[in-house]
Image (cartoon, rainbow, N blue to C red):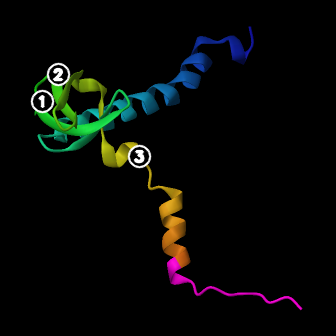
Amino acid sequence: MGILGSPIFLMLLFVPFIFMMWRRNKKETEARSKMKKGDKVVAGGLVGEIIDVDERFAKVKVAPGVTVQVVANMMTPLDSALPAPAAAKDAKDDKKAPSKTVESK
């Protein structure tokens, strides 16, 4: 049996993956524990504002007069869920740079 078949090698192979999963889970749990009433969240593809939250469920307002109840573990804070739109960044750069026109003869 070579080194690739040994149980120690297999454990060493999986340790980094387990560590990364544990660390991500810890960060997500911390982010969820900081969420409070009035925060913007993404829950199941719906973007809304937290109306009420307890240990298991949360009520999220997705539109005026429309409130949905979601599992609290499935919510993600909006600022970490959506990256800044690239189009908005490009528009800001366009306003700062002077425009140049090229004339053809």
Q: Quadrant of residue 26?
A: top left
| Residue at 85% from the left image edge and 88% from the top image edge | 104
Identify the residue position indicated by label 2 in the image: 57
Instruction: Identify the disc placed on residue 53.
Output: 1
Q: Position of residue 63 (x, y in %)?
A: 23, 37
| Among the two numbered marks 3 and 1 on one chain, the one whose residue lies closer to the N terminus | 1
Q: CA distance from mark 2 to mark 1?
A: 6 Å
Amino acid marked by disc 1 = Val
Please name whichever residue, 7 or 72, is drawn nearer the observer in this view of the structure: 72
| Residue at 12% from the left image edge and 30% from the top image edge | 53
Q: Position of residue 84 (x, y in %)?
A: 44, 56
| Residue at 25% from the left image edge and 38% from the top image edge | 48
Mark 2 secondary-structure assignment: strand
Q: Position of residue 27 (x, y in %)?
A: 32, 38
Q: Reply above or below: 46 against 4.
A: below
| Among the two numbered marks 2 and 3 on one chain, the one whose residue lies closer to the N terminus | 2
Query: Label 1 crowding class (10 Å Cα cut-off): few <14, some 14-19, many 20+?
Result: some
In this picture, which residue range is highlighted in magenta? 95-105
Q: Position of residue 69 (x, y in %)?
A: 19, 22
Q: CA distance from mark 2 to mark 3?
A: 22 Å
Please name whichever residue, 37 or 60, is drawn nearer the observer in this view of the structure: 60
Whether residues under marks 2 and 1 lie with C-beta atoms below 8 angstroms apart, the answer is yes
